[in-house]
Image: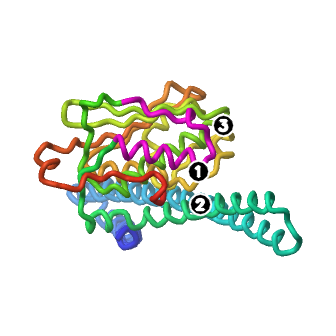
Amino acid sequence: MNITRRRGAIAFFITLGAILVGLTITQSAWILLNERTVAFAIVGIILFAALVAGVVLNTIFLVREVRRNERQDSFLNAVTHELKTPIASIRLYLETLQRRPVEEAQRQEFYKIMLSDSDRLLATVEQVLKAGQLGQRHRQQNRTVINLESLVADCIAITLQRHHLPPGSIVLEPVPSAVRLHTLGIAEDLRTAVINVLDNAVKYSPDGVHIRCSLAIVNYSTVALSITDTGVGLDPSQFKRIFKRFYRVPGRSMAKIKGTGLGLFLVRNIARQHGGDATANSPGPGLGVTITITLPLATIAEGTSRTNVSETSPMSHGHG
């Protein structure tokens, strides 16, 4: 769908450029032939203004296309690295196991590393697939009532295991037992969104992982999940840009952190498809970032009319 729309836009602006060239030639001849006629001169001025506006519009489109191509090139390089690195690692350990005898303890360590690399490889593939299939799958799947506290706790457990972190690295602030935080949605998509935010928080905390998660009701009808880290932080100019497809924050410190530029793009789109949104906030560079996902609370009628409230097991699901 996006490819078809983009091809249509390119064809439109190529046609517009050709028409502008033709109009410029026609107008030039017209003004030369009718230079003493006031009416023709006025029409010529109007046409000239229209031509200038068309040229400006065409130039803006071409600049956007160049930037989009640059982002896509950066994305392809990032994905290539994210795929090639774990494959090379797995191949190295397999060759080592094949060529020489290895003690059992070391063999188990090799297996552990290869499984970790396989998880990383699978996560990258799934993230790319979700970026292309999210909209279509969203329309096809039925929604269920989801216990957000349980879902976030599961996502934290998966992230701790994936990055080999101690339990205190990521903390979910307790929710009062009387408060029920449910939303109507697709559990797999919401799990993908939460894990993507947690993964980002871990990656962008080079000096130690200290992440705090909290759930709260906002305006009586919305639940907000806030995930705060103490990592590299953000400049206010980046708050909206980081949710764009393929976007990576510029800077030397950021360039060292690998990624596809799809994680937060997926987070925002999943939140919006569930009737919510995703926003970023930061006190500044070096002071950490808070990503907030807002979702509509499930109403009492929705909660009572559906018998399957999604409760998930932390180790039984894939990740985005």
Mark closest to the chain's N terminus, 3 or 1: 1
Proximity of marks 1 and 2: CB atoms separated by less than 8 Å? yes
Q: Is residue 164 magenta?
A: yes
Q: Is residue 320 visible?
A: no
- In the image, residue 225 above or below residue 190: above
> Residue type at mark 2?
Asp
Q: Is residue 234 left or right of residue 90?
A: left
Q: Is residue 157 magenta?
A: yes
Q: Secondary structure at mark 2?
A: helix
**Magenta residues, start to end:** 149-174
Q: CA distance from mark 3 to mark 2?
A: 21 Å
Q: Secondary structure at mark 1?
A: helix
In the picture, the disc for residue 119 is 2
> Residue type at mark 3?
Pro
| Residue identified by numbered label 1 | 162
Q: Nearer the viewer, mark 3 or mark 1?
A: 1
| Residue identified by numbered label 3 | 206
Give the quarter of the figure containing the N terminus.
bottom left
Q: CA distance from mark 1 to mark 2?
A: 8 Å
User: Is the stretch drawn in magenta largely helix, strand or loop?
Assistant: helix
Image spot of residue 168 (x, y percent): 56, 32
Q: Secondary structure at mark 3?
A: loop
Q: Is residue 172 left or right of residue 82?
A: left
Mark closest to the chain's N terminus, 1 or 2: 2
Image spot of residue 247 (x, y percent): 52, 50
Residue at figure coordinates x 30%, y 57% from the top left? 186
